């Protein structure tokens, strides 16, 4: 019969506790030495004025490694862009394909993008590893401003959104006057209650930095007051509804005096002929 032999016994040699303690102390000492050495390097760099240089070198190497690992700009997702020039948007964001995405500063880019004429607000985020997401809300033009022989789009805050050719300009109210954009929102709010009158206005002129004159489609000029503009517009609307004053031979309607309407006719009424006095015989 075959003989079963037991496997050789495994001999485990245990190091004396004293030696283990010495090894642990040695490892701790090595770690401490590394920390002290690193601290010493930093102190020496700081004293020699090279600390920032060292930190910059470390940061540059870290960014280079991140790019190698795929953390680089490869895609830009934009939401909300309609009028904003895409090239201007990317330039303001400071984005380049292949650049380290970890070096991209979303807050600084947001501030630059919000300085673009059409951008009212922006939100930017990094979507690691390779995408920058940009969401913008654009301004909405509410009027055309004629100034210095140019036509400019104006938003509700009076911001200049850029010039536009008159033949391609959208169907928006036309305003005239040096600082008219800053006051157009008030005028348009007042005209919201009178849509029939509003659609007949060809141009609105800001006069003397204090009030509006309206030029209607039939040539009638309406002079509005500095104060109480909504009441004056209501007065005009009531007069039109009751007497059709705007359809008459009128050149101008002056509403600058509260509660009064002064109408100037386009053609003076014929005066009765003067008769010569009879002479006695």
Image (spheres, rainbow, N blue to C red):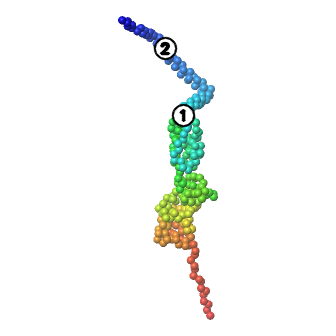
The residue depicted at 58 percent of the width and 43 percent of the height is 90
Nearer-the-camera pick, 218 or 178: 218
Residue sticking out furthest to the right: 149
Q: Helix, strand or loop at disc 1?
A: loop
The residue depicted at 51 percent of the width and 36 percent of the height is 128
The location of residue 41, given as percent across then percent down, is: 58, 23
The residue depicted at 53 percent of the width and 22 percent of the height is 35
Quarter where residue 38 is shown:
top right
Q: Which quadrant is home to the C terminus?
A: bottom right
The residue depicted at 53 percent of the width and 72 percent of the height is 248
Q: Residues within 10 Å of mark 2 (few under 14, many from 20)?
A: few
The location of residue 261, given as percent across then percent down, is: 51, 69
Query: Taking 226 as reference, is 88 above or below it?
Result: above
Q: Residues within 10 Å of mark 1 (few under 14, many from 20)?
A: many
Residue with the mark numbered 1: 71
Q: Earlier in the sequence, mark 1 or mark 2?
A: 2
Quarter where residue 164 is shown:
bottom right
Residue sticking out furthest to the bottom: 281
Mark 1–mark 2 distance (CA, rounded to whole Å): 41 Å
Nearer-the-camera pick, 219 or 93: 93
Q: Is residue 278 visible?
A: yes
Nearer-the-camera pick, 42 or 88: 88
The location of residue 85, given as percent across then percent down, is: 58, 48
Dot label at residue 249? none
Residue with the mark numbered 2: 23
Q: Nearer the viewer, mark 1 or mark 2?
A: 1
Query: Taking 154 as reference, is 104 above or below it?
Result: above
Nearer-the-camera pick, 69 or 62: 69
Q: Helix, strand or loop at disc 2?
A: helix
Report the label total. 2
Query: Taking 118 as reference, is 266 above or below it?
Result: below
The location of residue 210, given as percent across then percent down, is: 56, 60
């Amino acid at each position: 019969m075959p003989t079963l032999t037991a496997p050789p016994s495994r001999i485990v040699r245990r190091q004396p506790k004293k030696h283990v303690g010495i090894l642990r102390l040695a490892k701790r000492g090595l770690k401490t030495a590394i920390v002290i050495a690193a601290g010493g390097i930093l102190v020496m760099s700081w004293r020699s004025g090279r600390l920032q240089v060292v930190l910059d070198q470390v940061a540059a190497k870290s960014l280079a490694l991140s790019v190698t690992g795929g953390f680089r700009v490869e895609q830009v997702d934009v939401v909300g862009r309609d009028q904003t020039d895409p090239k201007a948007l990317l330039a303001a964001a400071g984005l380049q394909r292949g650049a380290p995405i970890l070096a991209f500063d979303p807050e600084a880019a947001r501030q630059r993008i919000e300085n673009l004429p059409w951008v009212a607000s922006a939100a930017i985020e990094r979507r690691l590893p390779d995408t920058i997401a940009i969401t913008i809300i654009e301004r909405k033009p509410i009027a055309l401003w004629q100034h210095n022989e140019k036509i400019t789009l104006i938003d509700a805050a009076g911001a200049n959104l850029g010039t536009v050719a008159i033949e391609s300009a959208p169907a928006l109210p036309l305003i005239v006057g040096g600082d008219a954009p800053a006051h157009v929102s008030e005028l348009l709010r007042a005209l919201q209650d009178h849509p029939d009158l509003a659609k007949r206005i060809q141009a609105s002129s800001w006069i003397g930095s204090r009030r509006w004159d309206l030029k209607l489609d039939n040539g009638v000029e309406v002079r509005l007051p500095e104060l109480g503009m909504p009441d004056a517009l209501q007065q005009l609307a009531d007069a039109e509804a009751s007497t059709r004053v705007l359809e008459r031979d009128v050149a101008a309607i002056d509403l600058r005096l509260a509660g009064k309407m002064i109408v100037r006719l386009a053609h003076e009424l014929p005066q009765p002929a003067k008769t010569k006095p009879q002479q006695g015989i």
